[in-house]
Amino acid sequence: MLIRKKSDILSSEITPQEVFENRREFLKAAGFGLIAGAAASTGLWSWQAEAAVQRQKIGAYTKTPFGAGEKPTPYDDITTYNNFYEFGTGKGDPARESKLFNPRPWTVSVEGEVKKAKHIAIEDIFKLAPLEERIYRMRCVEGWSMVIPWVGLPLAQLIKWAEPTANAKYVEFISLADPKTMPGVRVPILDWPYVEGLRMDEAMNPLTILAVGLYGEVLPNQNGAPIRLVVPWKYGFKGAKSIVKIRFTETMPQTAWMKAASSEYGFYANVNPTVDHPRWTQSTERRIGTGLFSPRIKTQMFNGYTEQVAHLYAGMDLRKNF
Amino acid sequence: MKTPDKKQLFRIKAVLFIAALIPLARLFWLGFQDNLGANPVEFVERSTGTWTLVMLMITLSMTPIKLLTGVAWQIQLRRMMGLFMFFYACLHFSTYIWLDHWFDWAEITKDIVKHPYVLVGFSAFVLTIPLAVTSNKAMIQRLRERWKMLHQLVYLIAILGVLHFWWLVKKDIREPLIYALVLAVLLGIRLYYKRSARTGRNMATRAVPSSS
């Protein structure tokens, strides 16, 4: 006898196989992520995720003599060892956590003490001036350094385009703080958004650039895509990343790190081997990419750019204005 | 839980011994594969420092486990874990003076004196030396009560060790906070039991009728 039993599951209730598989994948990923996250957050183990990010060449840029005699730090080191707290405070976090970040489309708002507030799309910044390669030393306040082949344009070019008024004494750089795509912003480590600033003459100095690329390629997310500030004679934290606002002001901007610890981080933050930080020695530095057995090297005044910038600080007490 | 016999205890110790060497083996493994990241010296320093703290916390957890559960046999593992703490502290300190500063004594002295986090870390390390030296049976028998007093230094070492990590980080204190909380719990359990033992004693004294 054949017993026909009606199925008590409607066909519409049956989970399609792919959804089922996806769910399993998701659960697996979530489970692994939890364990990995817990382990990583205690710092016992750390993973280096393989980046599957597309790399895009920059069409045209001119070479410059900057960085002659310096050996650029390997691309992998520059793009896996980052301080970019919007994506997490671990050095490896930015590379891992910024994969979903999309720096296109992007516009930068130019405001404050300017003839007329305006916006500029990233594509138009690329066309504002011929792009140049600038191989610069980068010294982090934590006592390590790199040599980075940036591609960018002088900040002075954008300032000219922005037409600041006579009242503009400082330039303030404000980074994106999007909790949806930047997990670090969900944690109140710093007073978001990240703010940095320069005195007008520092901003106009020919060494100061807005970088849009490195190693001849479009700037990777973890390095501050799509546009970041590079001021090679100052500690790395002055280089605001993923800039969305450039504001000209009459008074000195309060930067994110000044707000966080004014006794440790000053507005000027010039590389200076004679002014020590409460945590790190500033007389020497570790050059990234030179391996486990290479000794530290001596840190140079103004990171070796004395000739180009010392005049900016003539008569100033750099101990007080650190 | 059943107390392990001599043979079982030996096996437990052997397994623990090998397990405690895994972090070091991992460093060698990653090192030979050139896989210590962009800043290998920092990686080794961080890793050996982290495991020093972990071993220290394990060492300090033996007594609270006894207080909470009444199980006491694990106390016999304490010396080994304490010595592993010292072992990782030595690796940490060697990395600092060798790979980080290449025996530049002037620079090292300046670093220790001028930077509070280095100073407390260095102090903690120096304080572990007498503890490691007096960790054998002969010394325990020779020093007796003084041995107990001396080894109470471990609490100070633990506080300095956590402070060393706390003052090192720039802004994100979440990771050192974990160690601070674990330490607070471990010391808190001890204090709680000590205090309740004392009040218990007081009550007992009061309860004794005075005959004189």
Image (cartoon, helix red, strand yellow):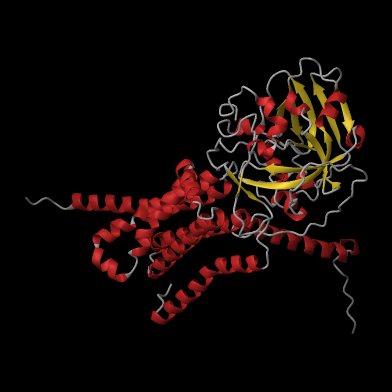
Q: Residue furthest left?
A: B212
User: Where does the image place residue A126, in percent across and percent down from the top left?
Assistant: 90, 37
- Give how far across and how far down residue B88 sits, in percent: 49, 62
Residue B184 at least partly seen: no
Position of residue A159 in the picture relative to residue A28 (left or right): right
Q: From the viewer's perspective, is residue B190 above or below residue A230?
A: below
Does residue B30 appear in this view? Answer: yes
- Residue A128 is left or right of residue B198, and the answer is right
Q: Give the mark count.
A: 0
Up/down of A79 relative to A127, above or below? below
The answer to whether B199 appears left or right of A112 in the picture is left
Can you tell which quarter of the image residue B29 is in?
bottom right
Q: Quadrant of the N terminus of chain B?
A: bottom left
Q: Nearer the viewer, residue A121 or A322?
A: A322
As drawn, A146 above or below B76: above
Q: Kindly identify the residue that appears in the image at 14 percent across and 51 percent down.
A: B209
Of residues B197 and A216, the one nearer the viewer is A216
- Residue at left offset 90%, top offset 36%: A130
Residue A99 screen position, x and y as percent? 79, 51
Q: Is residue A265 above or below residue B157?
A: above
* Residue drawn at the location 80% of the way across and 36% of the way down: A210
Horizontal and vertical percent position of residue A136 = 75, 42
Name the outermost residue toward the bottom: A1
Q: Residue at x 81, y 16 (%)?
A: A165
